[in-house]
């Protein structure tokens, strides 16, 4: 059984490291992007099962990344969980309008983000081997 791939797009190496350890422990394969341009390129290359997307990144921001991915027929259905320090309702609303399914505020609790990941993947018939 192949492991589902999750793309982590965040300019913070610490966030990427924490999320990589969490997702590897849950049985996922992880691909990492440090900026928006790299996130779009890697998403098109590896076609992940889920994208964890920081909204404020160098290059193109997360809102634009989400919009570009939604415009790509091969990626338009991939669930996107936005991660942001911007908790203003306008930023959250913009993320949802750009195509993100859920938004989590930084700093977040790992159990909260784990629940969100499961909520996004189960409807698509995907679970980590850890949960199967």
Image: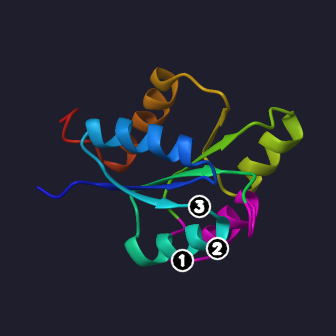
- From this viewpoint, is residue 120 visible? no
Q: Quarter holding the C terminus?
A: top left
Res. 45 in view: yes
Rendering coords of residue 19 (x, y %): 45, 40
Q: Residues within 10 Å of mark 2 (few under 14, many from 20)?
A: some
Locate residue 66, reporting x and y percent.
Answer: 66, 62
Q: Quickly name the residue at label 3.
A: 34
Label ID, residue 100: none
Question: What residue appears at the point 55 percent right and 41 percent down from the top-left corner?
Answer: 15
Magenta range: 58-76
| Mark 1 and mark 2 residues within 8 Å of each other at the beta carbon | yes
Q: Mark 3: give few (<14), some (14-19) or many (20+) Cα within 10 Å.
A: some
User: Is 122 situated left or right of 80 in this image?
Assistant: left
Identify which residue is drawn at 64% across, 73% down.
37
Q: In this view, does 104 lie above or below 52?
A: above
Q: Residue at x 40, y 62 (%)?
A: 48
Asked whether residue 65 is drawn in magenta, I would say yes
Residue 63 in the image: above or below residue 92: below
Q: State which quarter of the image contains the N terminus.
A: bottom left
The residue tagged with tag 1: helix, strand or loop?
Answer: helix
Q: Does residue 99 sit above or below 14 in this rendering?
A: below
**Position in image of residue 104 (x %, y %):** 64, 34
Residue underneath mark 1: 41
What secondary structure is marked by label 2?
helix
Q: In the figure, residue 21 lies in which quadrant?
A: top left
Could you tell me how far apart the alpha carbons at marks 2 and 3 are, in whole angstroms?
A: 9 Å
Gap between marks 1 and 3 measured at Cα? 11 Å
């Amino acid at each position: 059984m192949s492991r589902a791939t999750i793309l982590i797009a965040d300019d913070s190496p610490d966030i990427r490291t924490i999320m990589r350890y969490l997702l590897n422990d849950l049985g996922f394969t992880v691909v990492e992007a440090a900026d928006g341009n790299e996130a779009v390129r890697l998403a098109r290359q590896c076609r992940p099962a889920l994208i964890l997307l920081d909204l404020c990144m160098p290059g193109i921001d997360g809102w634009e990344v989400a919009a570009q991915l939604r415009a790509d027929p091969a990626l338009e259905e991939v669930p996107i969980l936005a991660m942001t320090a911007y908790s203003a309702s306008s930023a959250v609303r913009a993320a949802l309008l750009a195509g993100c399914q859920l938004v989590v505020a930084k700093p977040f609790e790992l159990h909260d983000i784990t629940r969100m990941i499961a909520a996004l993947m189960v409807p698509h018939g995907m679970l980590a081997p850890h949960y199967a």
